[in-house]
Image: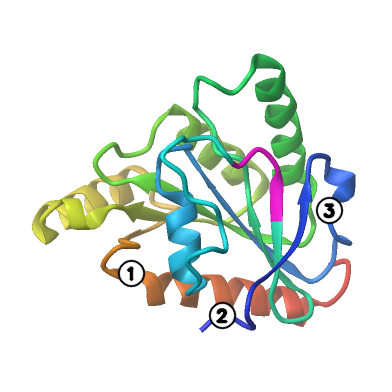
Amino acid sequence: MLPGSPEFLVAAHRLEQLPADEGGEVAFAGRSNSGKSTALNAICASRGLARTSKTPGRTQQLVVFALAPGSRLVDMPGYGYARVSERMRRHWGQALGDYLIGRRSLRGIILIADIRRGLGSGDRQLVALCASVGRPVHVLLTKADKLGRGRGLTAQRALQAEFPGVGFQLFSGRTGTGVEQARERITAWLLEGIKKGPGV
């Protein structure tokens, strides 16, 4: 289980609007139509925590949810969706890069990727950036229920071989596949942040 029940804290358009940079945060990232909001809701056992929509790209701020004291989840804006304006794309490209590189309380990234599509160019750029600054990444291969288990495991193994420093798992918000495993990974990161204390 996660350390505490998630509650909306703030939707930040600029990094200075985020909570104090202390304790531990885990951020959710991914392409706009990868099932990020569905995964976040499933992991938090709350249907309405993150907005789900048939229109990709609705999350255009850093949406922060508080858990236990000193622990937070952050829903990052989805990337790769054409209807986001070029000005907004440039803003978030810079802001998210600064967040991933400079946020001291950020303990890890949960990357959401549709298992049927694998990792796209945006996903690969994020993984490379995180590797360059020592940010751990754990990938949820969502919509695993759309494939048979054998095909899903084959896809997972292929990606694991290509990215040996990254964690991969099968996930389905609809069936619950992999939900508890994802919670355990997130909780371990957050507890690490609490143990390290403020500003570390």
Which residue of the protein is positioned furthest toward the top in this rendering?
A: 86
Q: Is residue 197 magenta?
A: no
As drawn, 1 above or below 48: below
Classified by dominant secondary structure, the portion drawn in magenta counts as: loop
State how many labels appear.
3
Query: Does dot 2 land on a helix, a strand or a loop?
Result: loop
Q: Amino acid at mark 3?
A: Leu
Q: Amino acid at mark 1?
A: Gly
Span highlighted in magenta in the image: 59-63
The residue at which mark 1 appears reads as 178
Neighbourhood count class around disc 2 (C-alpha, 10 Å): few under 14, some 14–19, many 20 upward: many
Q: Amino acid at mark 2?
A: Leu
Seen at 38% across and 71% down, the residue is 179
The residue at which mark 2 appears reads as 2
Neighbourhood count class around disc 3 (C-alpha, 10 Å): few under 14, some 14–19, many 20 upward: some
Quarter occupied by residue 139: bottom left
